[in-house]
Each structure stands twice: as C-alpha cells, then as structure tokens.
Amino acid sequence: MFNLDYFAVVMFFLGLFGLITARNAIKTIIFTLIMQTAVIMFWLFLSARTGTTPPIIYDPAILYDTAAIADPTPQALMLTAIIIGISVSAIKITMLNYLFRRYQTADWDLMHKLVAEEERQNPYT
C-alpha cells in the first residue's frame, strides 16, 4: 500500500532539487511553493488517524476516550502555515516584479552580472 507520507517527502525533495537547479526566479518561487505544500501535506498526513472523531463532542461517553478524539492542533498550525506561506509568496512576487522592472530579466545569473556592473559604475549607492 502506498503511504502518503512518502509522497510528501518525495515532493519536498523534488522541490528542493528544482530550487537548487532553477536559474529563473519564477521557477524558484514555484519550487518553494511546492516545498511548502509538501511540508503541510506531510504534517497533515502524519497527524491523521483513522477511527477518530472531531473534537465536537455529541456523546458524553466519548469524552473519556481521548484516543478516539482527533487532535485539532496540527490542523490549526497548518492553517497558520498556509496563511504565512501566502504572505511570503506575495512578498516574493512583489520583489520579483521590482527586480524584473529594474533589470528586464528573471534569470538569476544575468541579474547578478547586472548588479555587479551597476556596483562597478557607481560604488557609493
């Protein structure tokens, strides 16, 4: 049987490989989003247990069986991680927009060359 935890780990390392090998800034953002999604999936799959009920108690008898109640903490933490990830992605896209408007490229190597040339021409800025 295929375990979804392994899928999340493989997805994370594929994102890491893509992040290391990407020369384009847009691909870098996409691969960091893939890695973030893999981490969230991993923690949600790790905390999922079959046979548990949500922490909304309808039957008072289940209140004493703590193994049968699902823990809402991992889901709450992953919702927070999703919101933080969206905010960080918005900042990355904004920074990429600024860099693209300034240097007219999304290639990291070309951007580094243009920045180095700009610093040689005006070293005091």
Image (cartoon, helix red, strand yellow):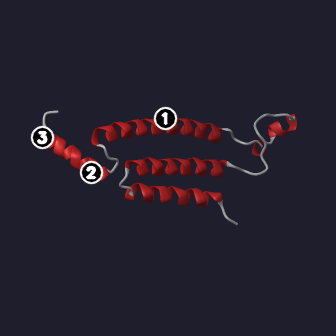
Query: Hey, which quadrant is residue 125 in on the image?
Result: top left
User: In the drawing, does residue 37 fall left or right of residue 45?
Assistant: left
Give the number of the disc on residue 121.
3
Q: Amino acid at mark 2?
A: Leu
Seen at 59% across and 59% down, the residue is 7
- Which is more toward the observer, 35 or 59? 35
Placement of 7 over or under 67, stated as above or below? below
Residue with the mark numbered 1? 87
x and y, in percent, of residue 102 in the image: 29, 38
Query: Sequence order check: which comes first, mark 3 or mark 2?
Result: 2
User: In the drawing, does residue 75 fall left or right of residue 23?
Assistant: right
Residue with the mark numbered 2? 110
Query: Hey, which quadrant is residue 93 in on the image?
Result: top left
Residue furthest bottom in the image = 1
Asked which secondary structure carries label 1, the reply is helix
Asked which secondary structure carries label 3, the reply is helix
User: In the drawing, does residue 29 fall left or right of residue 74?
Assistant: left
- Decide: few, some or many residues near mark 1? Use Cα within 10 Å; few <14, some 14-19, many ≥20: few
x and y, in percent, of residue 105 in the image: 32, 46
x and y, in percent, of residue 78 in the image: 59, 41
Q: Amino acid at mark 3?
A: Gln
- Decide: few, some or many residues near mark 3? Use Cα within 10 Å; few <14, some 14-19, many ≥20: few
Seen at 63% across and 42% down, the residue is 74
